Image (cartoon, rainbow, N blue to C red):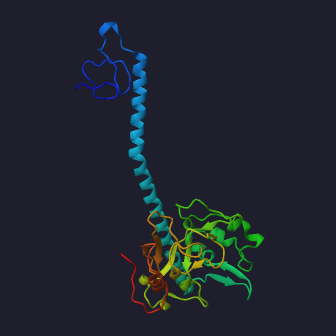
């Protein structure tokens, strides 16, 4: 059976007008009928639109999937680099940073992500901060409004809070970083490879300079602004272990198992899921 030379539809030999794109067919000039240029152009346009639609339907999901993989890879890289920065800080100070340093008994001064600025290539911002003043002192406004790429998950579009402070999309494990005095890696007797250090958050985003940016993995995942949470479609959350390795943990993982991974010296025999 012949086909239309414009859109490729199958046509009967005696057909003069393509039933698909409605153009007069070349060579079908019986009865003095001539080839309709206007119809041909219309058919070309319709065929082009149909072809473009097919391309979009096929290509768009592939592009979206690749973009998702790139975003996920970027977040994993951020976590790995955060863990590395904490290791270098540890080498220099013989302990991990505390979640919130104190100016006095009532006022919290600075958070752990401020302390590691020199180790994430942000020495200029670090030099602009007076550690004898609270983090939200007016003198620090410009410094804490600066976005830091390593602290941002590319999947999350929100980068500043209502005050203008730049956000972080990651939080520390409260069992490790919210300790006074600060702990050293030697204190993590459950093993660095078996202990959560930092992880992804989705809700309750805080400024990167704000003291106390830690959460308890033992509260479970994806349960609101006080827990670690996933921005990914599958609900999984990425964490960096204290040895620097990055792991994905399923969103339905039971809290007791997460608690065992969170405690640095609980004596539990658990490992990250494969």
Total labels drawn: 0
Give how far across and how far down residue 93 sits, in percent: 57, 85
Quadrant the N terminus occupies: top left
Residue at point 66%, 74% (across, down): 210
Residue at point 24%, 20% (across, down): 13
* Residue 266 vertical position relative to residue 76 in the rendered view, above or below: below
Residue at point 42%, 22% (across, down): 41
Quadrant the C terminus occupies: bottom left
Of all residues, the one furthest to the right in this rendering is: 138
Please state which of residues 11 and 43 is positioned toward the viewer in this rendering: 11
Left or right of 212? Residue 23 is left
Q: Quadrant of residue 167?
A: bottom right
* Residue 67 vertical position relative to residue 131 in the rendered view, above or below: above
* Residue 211 vertical position relative to residue 153 in the rendered view, above or below: below
Please state which of residues 14 and 231 is positioned toward the viewer in this rendering: 14
Residue at point 41%, 19% (across, down): 39
Left or right of 130? Residue 184 is left
Q: Quadrant of residue 202?
A: bottom right
Give how far across and how far down residue 108 sits, in percent: 70, 82
Of all residues, the one furthest to the top in this rendering is: 32
Left or right of 43? Residue 130 is right
Give how far across and how far down residue 155 sits, in percent: 52, 61
Give how far across and how far down residue 246 sits, in percent: 43, 73
Please state which of residues 121 and 10 is positioned toward the viewer in this rendering: 10
* Residue 112 vertical position relative to residue 39 in the rendered view, above or below: below
């Amino acid at each position: 059976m012949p086909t239309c030379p414009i859109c490729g539809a199958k046509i009967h030999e005696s057909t003069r007008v393509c039933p698909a794109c409605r153009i007069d067919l070349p060579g079908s000039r019986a009865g003095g009928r001539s080839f309709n240029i206007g119809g041909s152009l219309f058919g070309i346009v319709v065929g082009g639109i149909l072809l473009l639609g097919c391309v979009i339907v096929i290509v768009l999901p592939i592009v979206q999937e690749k973009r998702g993989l790139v975003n996920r890879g970027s977040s994993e890289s951020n976590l790995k680099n955060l863990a590395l920065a904490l290791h270098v800080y540890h080498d220099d100070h013989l302990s991990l940073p505390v979640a919130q340093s104190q100016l006095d008994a009532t006022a919290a001064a600075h958070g752990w992500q401020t302390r590691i600025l020199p180790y994430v290539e942000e020495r200029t911002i670090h030099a602009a901060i007076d550690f004898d003043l609270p983090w939200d002192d007016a003198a620090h406004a410009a410094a804490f409004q600066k976005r830091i790429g390593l602290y941002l998950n590319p999947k999350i579009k929100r980068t500043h809070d209502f005050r203008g402070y730049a956000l972080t999309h990651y939080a520390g494990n409260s069992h490790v970083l919210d300790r006074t005095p600060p702990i050293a890696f030697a204190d993590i007797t459950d093993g660095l490879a078996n202990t959560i250090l930092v992880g992804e958050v989705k809700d309750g985003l805080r400024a990167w300079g704000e003291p106390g940016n830690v959460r308890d993995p033992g509260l479970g995942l994806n349960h609101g602004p006080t827990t670690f949470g996933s921005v990914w479609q599958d609900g999984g959350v990425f964490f960096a272990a204290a040895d620097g390795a990055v792991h994905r943990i399923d969103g339905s993982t039971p809290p007791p198992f997460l608690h065992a991974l969170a405690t640095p010296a609980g004596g539990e025999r658990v490992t990250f899921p494969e």
